[in-house]
């Protein structure tokens, strides 16, 4: 693993600290009036999700971790366990719902995802930026509601409820961001 100086740490870096991988969320270069300058880092443990703040001086050497990303295909869900198949070796792995997070509700059979590994331990599952789904049910438009930029609740084919513009009706295909469940656009039929 490459080593970097304490003042070279940047947000997004993954470093090894106390024998564990940590993702740097924020950094701030601090130069107090007395004493040497240091880099104040807010970090999240990639194994447990806990956060901490650490100070690193320029003289400190930190090991920067390289995470491995591999493409997988989603196969099926069993309780809170999700099974994926490696697209190159056809090996299957099972990942818990807490690693995937909220986007798990947008997983569809056959969907290609990227799984991030640290020493063969899956840390993160990234779904495509956008998915296309059909609206199963949408509340009717209330008269006068179209005059403002309001949204109404709708249920998608996978059972997820999102907010859509008033012009979206049942049977409409829409594009959604799995990361936050937000409506992007209506597709033309």
Image (cartoon, rainbow, N blue to C red):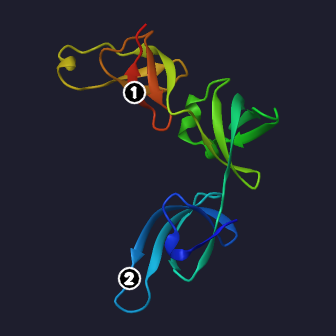
Asked whether 13 or 51 is in front, the reply is 13
Q: As drawn, is 161 to the left or to the right of 104?
A: left
Asked whether 138 or 72 is in front, the reply is 72
| Mark 2 vs mark 1, CA separation in Å | 44 Å
In the image, residue 9 sits, relative to residue 49, either above or below, namely: below
Tell me which residue sits at (82%, 35%) in the image. 89
In the image, residue 51 sits, relative to residue 176, either above or below, namely: below
Tell me which residue sits at (38%, 22%) in the image. 185
Tell me which residue sits at (56%, 75%) in the image. 5
Which image quarter: residue 26? Answer: bottom left
Q: Secondary structure at mark 1?
A: strand
Which image quarter: residue 86? Answer: top right
Assign the C terminus to one quadrant of the image. Answer: top left
Query: Quick check: can you spot residue 28?
Result: yes
Q: Residue furthest bottom?
A: 34
- Residue 110 point in image, percent of width and height: 68, 24
Residue 135: give its label: none
Question: Viewer-nearest of labels 2 and 1?
Answer: 2
Find disc 1 in the rendering and name its residue: 184
- Residue 183 point in image, percent of width and height: 40, 27
Say few, some or many: other residues with alpha carbon within 10 Å of mark 2 (under 14 / 14 to 19 / 20 or more).
Answer: few
Question: Tag 1 or tag 2, which sits nearer the N-term?
Answer: 2
Assign the N terminus to one quadrant of the image. Answer: bottom right
Residue 31: give its label: 2
Q: Secondary structure at mark 2?
A: loop
Q: How many numbered dots are placed on residues in this image?
A: 2
Say few, some or many: other residues with alpha carbon within 10 Å of mark 1 (under 14 / 14 to 19 / 20 or more).
Answer: some
Q: Residue furthest top?
A: 189
- Residue 67 point in image, percent of width and height: 66, 54
In the image, residue 123 sits, relative to residue 62, either above or below, namely: above
Query: Quick check: can you spot residue 53?
Result: no
């Amino acid at each position: 693993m490459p080593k970097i100086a304490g003042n070279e740490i940047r947000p997004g870096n993954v470093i090894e600290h106390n024998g564990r991988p940590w993702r740097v969320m924020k950094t701030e270069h601090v130069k107090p009036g007395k004493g040497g300058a240091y880099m104040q880092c807010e970090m999240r443990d990639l194994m447990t999700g806990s956060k901490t703040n650490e100070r690193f001086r320029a003289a400190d050497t930190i090991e920067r971790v390289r995470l491995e990303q591999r493409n997988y295909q989603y196969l099926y869900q069993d309780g809170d366990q999700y099974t994926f198949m490696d697209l190159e070796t056809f090996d299957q792995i099972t990942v818990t719902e807490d690693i995937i997070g909220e986007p798990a509700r947008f997983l569809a059979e056959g969907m290609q995802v990227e799984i991030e590994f640290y020493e063969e331990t899956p840390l993160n599952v990234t779904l495509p930026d956008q998915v296309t789904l059909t609206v199963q049910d949408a509340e009717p438009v209330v008269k006068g509601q179209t005059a403002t930029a309001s949204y109404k609740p709708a249920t998608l084919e996978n059972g997820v409820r999102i907010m859509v513009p008033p012009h979206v009706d049942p049977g409409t295909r829409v594009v959604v961001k799995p990361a936050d469940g937000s409506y992007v656009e209506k597709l033309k039929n």
